[in-house]
């Protein structure tokens, strides 16, 4: 078979998918770019061309910089915590013990729950009047009185990060667990014979096998955390006093609540650009780690 | 690959199915309601069932969303080419909905009987620029609810007539150790906070706008926020109020953990239901208090209306449905969680029986209803004010500074 035919066949096979992708991703993206240079409303007429006004207004507004900081904090802390907890959970679940299969299945549960359900559950747990967290902490004498976890700027973001971690660490654990199965037993056995302690064994024997898959988990989680919307919308709607408002919530407010489709589109594209930069940087890292691991 | 193709095909068939017009003679209406305060979901379903029984050729699909999602859902459905024929809308949206052509002008369908029979205050809910964009349906304002048991134990004979008195009575209750924080409000970063604030603005005789420009940062508007901050800082207000919505306030009140609470009509009969409430039979209700020398009582216009969307393909059937839902007979039958828009209902024993206290409070409160500003940019104004209220409560900013910033960010 000639290589031209191979190429043609590959393109032919991919064509249906390409058509669908162009229709559902490509066209809306182009449309959004066009929209971002206008003062269009969500409903009604197309709006007038306003050049880069939307972009300069957005980038110079204090709302944007504050929201960017909040989003970054949320993404960095929650993803870091999810990676650590996920790997630790995977190491535990990789041990031989009775009931391991049940635990492994149970661990998936938080991740399998719809985010809105998860957010509603955590709202109940954090409830300032009858929440389980307040009850547990007062009974353990860790706090004197019930507190408003989602009503104070100091604790609201942390509370959201905990809820997000609970939901998403299983994904990291799942990926890490799969990678752990690939670590050859003779190598770990040999390192034991050589007298390597648990930390060194993890650092020099196990981690190299995990690095590649963990990078993939890191990329997926960072991008998702950066785009976070639903869990925050359900739990705090960006409050108190906008202390948990993330970029996606700002986009939503601008485009849908305030119906300014034009500036909403420009903001959405700025966020897309930020996420793309992250994704490309990570992809390069993944290639590097994969290269060094091989 | 094959899977992708199959999925695509399945998706296309599914999407196509939605577009195929129904091959029946009957009309299907899609209606959007809220599942929060006022009529319960069960009430709305029962009313609708009665309508479809009387009109077997019309089918009504009901959808319920929380109040917080109602505006955005309506606008999004419109932006994507429609979906609803009938939508429930809040008193603050007609300006925006009319300007952006979300609702149709139904002025010609409002009969003289309707104009004569419906309370004048209710019409402001659906009017913009002299035109009617629907029928008022939920006639509501925030009342001051009190726990008779706790007031009696504190030796308080009559509920407060002024906001100052409310603070003084709460202090007595707190000092006697009856409750740590006697007052509950809904001050979450949401429209609910604006409704409480507006009640106070009306008490202090403030203005939201003057000549189309923000004026809430001066006079009564400022006094209103200062009252909230003082009440919060003095510890008389439940500090969790800043993350409460109306339903949270109801739960706290029903649990006997609040002596005073500001809430809508629906709490009266719910808190008096011994099935869910620990305070059944002890629920008192009066109009929200006034301010000495300025106002007798205070009230926010928290009414809502039903309108026909501009994209509806069955506007006549949709209007018929609205007429049925807002008719005096229907409203009198379901007058426990929301009171009728019809003036004569308030003297009808079938409506007043068993809730005489609520009706008495309603007669005063509904007459004093103060509107939130009528502007197409209401959502921006409200968002800016919500932030100002929360920043002041949290001590991040003084009420003066917070309101000045809100005025700047209000988009007006």
Image: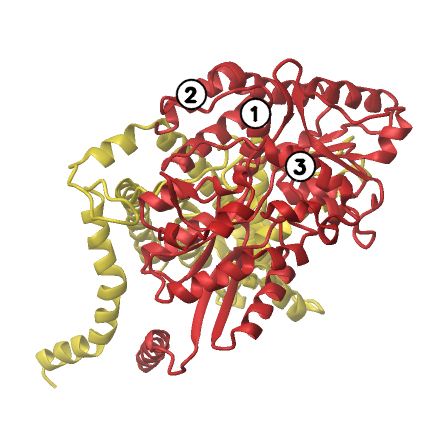
Chain colours: A yellow, B red
Picture coordinates of residue B113, whole percent (x, y) = 51, 51
**Are the residues at dot 2 and dot 3 in contact (C-beta closer than 8 Å)?**
no
Q: What residue is drawn where x is 71% and y is 30%?
A: B238
Subunit ID for the residue under disc 3: B
Q: How many marks?
A: 3
- Within 10 angstroms of label 3, few (less than 14), some, or many (20 or more) residues? few
Mark nearest the camera among 2 and 1 is 1
- Rounded to the nearest whole Å, what is the CA distance between mark 2 and mark 1? 21 Å
Q: State the residue position of label 1.
A: B202
Circles 1 and 3 on the same subunit: yes
Q: Which mark is residue A56?
A: none
Q: Closer to us: mark 1 or mark 3?
A: 3
Label 2 crowd bin: few (<14), some (14–19), many (20+), radius 10 Å = some
Going from N to C along the chain, the mark reached first, 2 or 3, is 3
**Which residue is drawn at the image coordinates 77% and 18% (left, top)?**
B168
Q: Nearer the viewer, residue A155 or B300?
A: B300
Q: CA distance from mark 1 to mark 3?
A: 17 Å
Report the residue marked by disc 3. B363
């Amino acid at each position: 078979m000639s290589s031209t035919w191979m190429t043609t066949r590959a393109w032919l096979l991919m064509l249906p998918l390409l058509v669908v992708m162009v229709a559902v991703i490509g066209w809306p993206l182009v449309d959004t770019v066009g929209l971002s240079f206008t003062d269009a409303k969500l409903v009604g007429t197309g709006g007038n061309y306003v050049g880069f006004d939307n972009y300069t207004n957005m980038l110079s507004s204090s709302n944007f910089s504050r929201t960017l900081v909040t989003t970054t904090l949320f993404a960095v802390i929650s993803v870091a915590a999810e990676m650590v907890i996920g790997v630790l959970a995977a190491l535990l679940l990789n041990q031989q013990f009775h009931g391991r299969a049940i635990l492994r299945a149970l661990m998936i549960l938080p991740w399998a729950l719809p985010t809105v359900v998860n957010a509603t559950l955590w709202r109940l747990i954090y409830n300032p009047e009858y929440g389980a967290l307040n009850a547990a902490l007062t009974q353990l004498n860790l706090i004197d009185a019930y507190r408003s976890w989602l009503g104070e700027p100091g604790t609201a973001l942390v509370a959201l990060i905990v809820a997000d971690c609970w939901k998403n660490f299983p994904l990291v654990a799942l990926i890490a667990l799969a990678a752990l199965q690939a670590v050859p037993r003779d190598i770990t056995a040999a390192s034991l014979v050589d007298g390597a302690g648990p930390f060194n064994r993890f650092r020099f024997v196990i981690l190299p096998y995990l690095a590649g898959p963990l990078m993939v988990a890191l990329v997926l989680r960072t991008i998702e955390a950066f785009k976070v919307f639903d869990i925050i919308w359900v739990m705090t709607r960006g409050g108190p006093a906008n202390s948990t408002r993330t970029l996606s919530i700002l986009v939503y407010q601008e485009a849908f609540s305030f119906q300014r489709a034009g500036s909403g589109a420009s903001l959405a594209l700025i966020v897309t650009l930020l996420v793309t930069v992250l994704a490309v940087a990570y992809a390069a890292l993944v290639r590097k780690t994969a290269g060094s691991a091989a | 690959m094959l899977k992708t193709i199959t999925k695509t095909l399945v998706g296309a068939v599914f999407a196509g199915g939605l577009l195929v017009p129904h091959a029946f003679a009957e009309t299907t209406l899609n209606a959007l309601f809220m599942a929060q305060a006022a009529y319960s979901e069960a009430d709305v379903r029962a009313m609708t069932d009665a309508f479809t029984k009387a009109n077997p050729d019309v089918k009504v699909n009901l959808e319920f969303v929380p109040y917080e999602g109602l505006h955005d859902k309506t606008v999004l459905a419109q932006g994507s080419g429609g979906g609803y024929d009938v939508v429930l809308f809040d008193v603050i949206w007609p300006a925006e909905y009319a300007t952006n052509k979300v609702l149709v002008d139904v002025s010609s369908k409002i009969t003289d009987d309707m104009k004569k029979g419906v309370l004048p205050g209710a019409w402001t809910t659906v009017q913009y620029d002299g035109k009617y964009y629907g029928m008022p349906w939920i006639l509501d304002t925030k009342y001051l609810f009190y726990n008779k048991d706790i007031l009696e134990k504190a030796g308080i004979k009559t509920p407060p007539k002024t906001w100052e008195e409310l603070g003084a009575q709460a202090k007595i209750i707190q000092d006697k150790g009856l409750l740590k924080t006697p007052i509950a409000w809904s001050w979450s970063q949401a429209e609910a906070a604006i409704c409480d604030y507006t009640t106070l603005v009306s008490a202090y005789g403030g203005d939201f706008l003057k000549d189309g420009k923000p004026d809430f940062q001066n006079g009564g508007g400022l006094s209103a926020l200062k009252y909230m901050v003082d009440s919060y800082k003095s510890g008389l207000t439940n500090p969790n109020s800043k993350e409460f919505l109306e339903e949270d306030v109801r739960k706290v009140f029903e649990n006997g953990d609040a002596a005073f609470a500001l809430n809508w009509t629906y709490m009266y009969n719910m808190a008096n239901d011994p099935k869910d409430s620990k305070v059944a039979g002890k629920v008192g209700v009066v109009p929200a208090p006034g301010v000495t020398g300025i106002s007798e009582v205070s009230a926010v216009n928290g009414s809502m209306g039903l309108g026909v969307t501009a994209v509806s393909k069955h506007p006549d059937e949709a209007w018929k449905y609205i007429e049925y839902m807002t008719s005096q007979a229907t409203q009198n039958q379901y007058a426990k969680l929301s009171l009728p828009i019809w003036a004569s209902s308030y003297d009808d024993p079938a409506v007043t029986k068993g809730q005489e206290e609520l009706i008495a409070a309603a007669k005063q409160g509904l007459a004093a209803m103060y509107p939130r500003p009528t502007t197409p940019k209401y959502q921006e104004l409200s968002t800016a004010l919500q932030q100002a209220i929360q920043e002041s409560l949290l001590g991040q900013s003084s009420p003066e500074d917070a309101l000045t910033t809100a005025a700047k960010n209000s988009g007006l």
